[in-house]
Image (cartoon, helix red, strand yellow):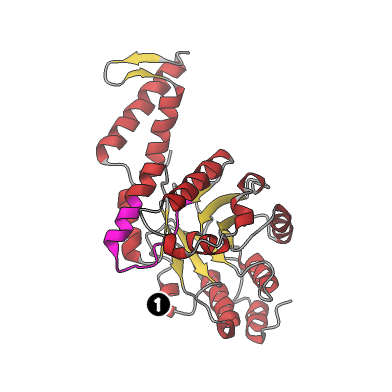
Amino acid sequence: MIENPNIKKDILSGKIQKMPKPKNSAQAVKTSLMINPTNPKHLEKLSSIEAQIAVINLEDGVAQSKKEEALYLTMNALSSLEYSNAAMCVRTNPIDSPFFANEIEAVNIVRPDAIRIPKLKTREELLKIEDALHPDIDIHLTIETKEAFNKISELKTSERVTTLFFGAIDLLEDLGLGSSMIDVKSETLRYMMCKFIVDAKSFGFTPVSFVWQNYTDMRGFEDWLKIEKEMGFSAKACISPAQVKVANEFFSPCGEALEDAAYIKEIFEKNEALGIGGFKDEKFGFIDAPIYKNAILTLKKGGIIL
């Protein structure tokens, strides 16, 4: 039960209530941005950030003595948020934390788009969270324990579990390898990233690559973006608006690609209406359903709502 008197008072007065912002449509995710709820400037910008997911962080980066304050500020900010292009996600503390039960009770009141669970280990833990959580709230997971990393196939407990974040630093530490392996030359890290994205895609998750902590090192950030795009990633976790801007541009299709995709969509749908599922095209050769699906994906990545 929530014991904080300020939270109780604001719930009773109606100040803390269900978030008025409409739930986001299924726009393609290219970036997430970490938000510190104890920094008023961060919360003030929730309505204008350019990332597709705003992650209000109650876990790492918030001191033990500030946990209740962070939760209170988060609930108030979401209760008054009427508009944002970004989906609102609250990153809770781990399930075994003394703060977790209060956080679940709080998010059930304000109902953000999603919560993000760190340090998850088992399917059973996830099922308990689903049972306790309001059905309108999606679930994102940070894959940062060796148990979760090797059991991604078991974590699609429902369609509400939509997105996986690759927690490189904690996962490397949990494996006894050390975060010093976060290096573009590390074959082990590349293997882990490839396994993560293949497993995530295989079981219907949206995979998001790891945070580049040195937010002033944009060259290093861009080096990782190139590697991630080659691996098949199309989304990056960010900790600064500058990172968001670069990653959004990097993962967005160019104008020519969007024009080609729009052409394929139009001509395929015209032929399909005539009962033709595959056909020869002067511009692109043979066009069939897989080519059409890829065109639709390109349009979604470009932010075009179909």
From this viewpoint, is residue 194 visible?
A: yes
Q: Quadrant of the C terminus?
A: top left
Measured from the top left, where is residue 258 in percent x and y? 31, 37
Measured from the top left, where is residue 211 in percent x and y? 43, 61
Measured from the top left, where is residue 79 in percent x and y? 55, 71
Drawn side of residue 155 relative to residue 253, left or right: right
| Secondary element at image label 1 | helix
Q: Give amino acid for label 1.
A: Lys
The residue drawn where x is 27% and y is 60% is 219
Report the number of numbered marks: 1
Measured from the top left, where is residue 89 in percent x and y? 53, 62
Residue 212 in magenta stretch: yes
Which stretch is magenta?
208-225
Drawn side of residue 33 relative to residue 253, left or right: right
From this viewpoint, is residue 138 visible?
A: no
Q: Quadrant of the N terminus?
A: bottom right
Reading the image, the residue beneath label 1 is 41
Instruction: Say which of 3 and 179 sits in front.
Output: 179
Is 118 above or below relative to 10? above
The residue drawn where x is 27% and y is 20% is 283
Residue 279 quadrant: top left
Residue 303 in magenta stretch: no
Crowd band around label 1 with a 10 angstrom C-alpha radius: few (<14), some (14–19), many (20+): few
